[in-house]
Amino acid sequence: MINENIVTYSPSHIVVPTYKCFNRCGYCNFRQDVENSPEMDLQTATNIFHNLQSFNICEILIISGETHRSSSERPQWFQRIYNLCELALNMGFLPHTNVGILSFAEMQRLKQVNVSMGLMLEQITPKLVQTVHRNAPSKLPSLRLEQLKWAGELQIPFTTGLLLGIGEVEDDCWDALKVLAKLHKKYGHIQEVILQPYSQGNKQTWQGDTFNPYKLPEIIHCSRQILPPDITIQIPPNLVRDNGWLIACLEAGAGDFGGISLKDEVNPDYPQIRVEELQKILQLSGWNLIPRLPVYPQFTNWLVPNLQVAVSNWQKFISVTQ
Ligand SMILES: O=c1nc2n(C[C@H](O)[C@H](O)[C@H](O)CO)c3cc(O)ccc3cc-2c(=O)[nH]1
Ligand SMILES: C[C@H]1O[C@@H](n2cnc3c(N)ncnc32)[C@H](O)[C@@H]1O
Ligand code: SF4
């Protein structure tokens, strides 16, 4: 009998080109203010990728702080990201880039070296522009929606999502999800939507309480009604630290745990749960955790030819190791 109780995850490693960021989101525990915050050079990245080759990691997730589009440092910032993706690809990995707001031309270039890309919508209600996003020009909803539209036009398999608990009300979430559903109906490019519970950390400036994870199953249930069925709902297991509620999230319609890496760079105060441990927790309730690639199978033919080859090599590997 086919077991339909399947949850997927992507075995991944996060690479951070820079922690420096010209935005100051009130909830951020990632950015570093240091003028000379360490920047990832290609030699260091080569060493990291070399060490990763003996583990079954397929995704290199590139997450970065941002440089303003008219800054003189922008070309160098972008080139570093491009070079890291290219290196990851040449060393056998599949890159997924989420580095914030990009121009159409920058997205077009990154499509050549990424199997999928992402940008969280966060929320669309304009009231956050006065609060947590007051000092974060990149979080203007109009800019993020424009990027989601460009991703569709460029046929880039895309990950987006909502950050929950940053000052929105439930109706704001439904409005945001309806916009995502509409975009997907036009372009068909959204592979997954992350429902990300905002989780308070050590470094942030905003004093908001952590999103109550007990509300998550209900939100997932309603989101499932709004989103088209071919979009997977992703939740981060390290931010839902109660096994019963984690299972309730799956029963409500979440189908994926996202990238599981050694360290969650975005929420460093919330250690990742090891895959073996997650597997045990799930099996007790009749669920199965299985690895997936950072691009969903229905999108492979959107990729440039050399990426299609890289993906097909990993597809063969994943199917023999299961
Ligand atoms: O480990 C994390 N992975 C994050 N990911 C990675 C994601 O789990 C995987 O890279 C995708 O599922 C692709 O396989 C994001 C990807 C995006 O495109 C947009 C936002 C995120 C956010 C996180 C995050 O907070 N932590
Ligand atoms: C990379 C993504 O991580 C999310 N993000 C940023 N800060 C936090 C936090 N404190 N808790 C949960 N998610 C966060 C945002 O949605 C961002 O776009
Ligand atoms: S969440 Fe992203 S955009 Fe906001 S401050 Fe942190 S790194 Fe910068």
Image: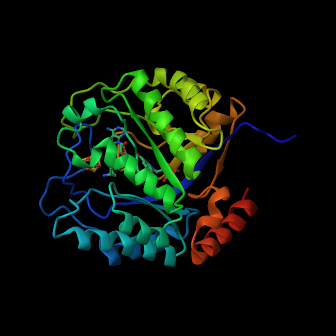
Q: Quadrant of residue 310?
A: bottom right
Residue at (32% x, 49% y) in the render: 143
Q: Position of residue 205 (x, y in %)?
A: 18, 36
Residue at (21% x, 45% y) in the render: 136
Q: Position of residue 165 (x, y in %)?
A: 35, 28
Farthest right residue? 1
Q: Position of residue 114 (x, y in %)?
A: 49, 67
Residue at (20% x, 59% y) in the render: 68
Vertical comparison of 150 with 214: above or below:
below
Q: Quadrant of the C terminus?
A: bottom right
Q: Quadrant of the N terminus?
A: top right
How many marks can you see? 0
The answer to whether residue 30 is visible is no
Q: Is residue 245 left or right of residue 49?
A: right
Residue at (29% x, 74% y) in the render: 41
Judging depth in this view, the residue of 89 and 98 nearest the camera is 98
Vertical comparison of 40 with 200: above or below:
below
Vertical comparison of 233 with 96: above or below:
above
Judging depth in this view, the residue of 1 and 67 nearest the camera is 67
Judging depth in this view, the residue of 181 and 211 nearest the camera is 181
Q: Position of residue 262 (x, y in %)?
A: 45, 53
The answer to whether residue 105 is visible is yes
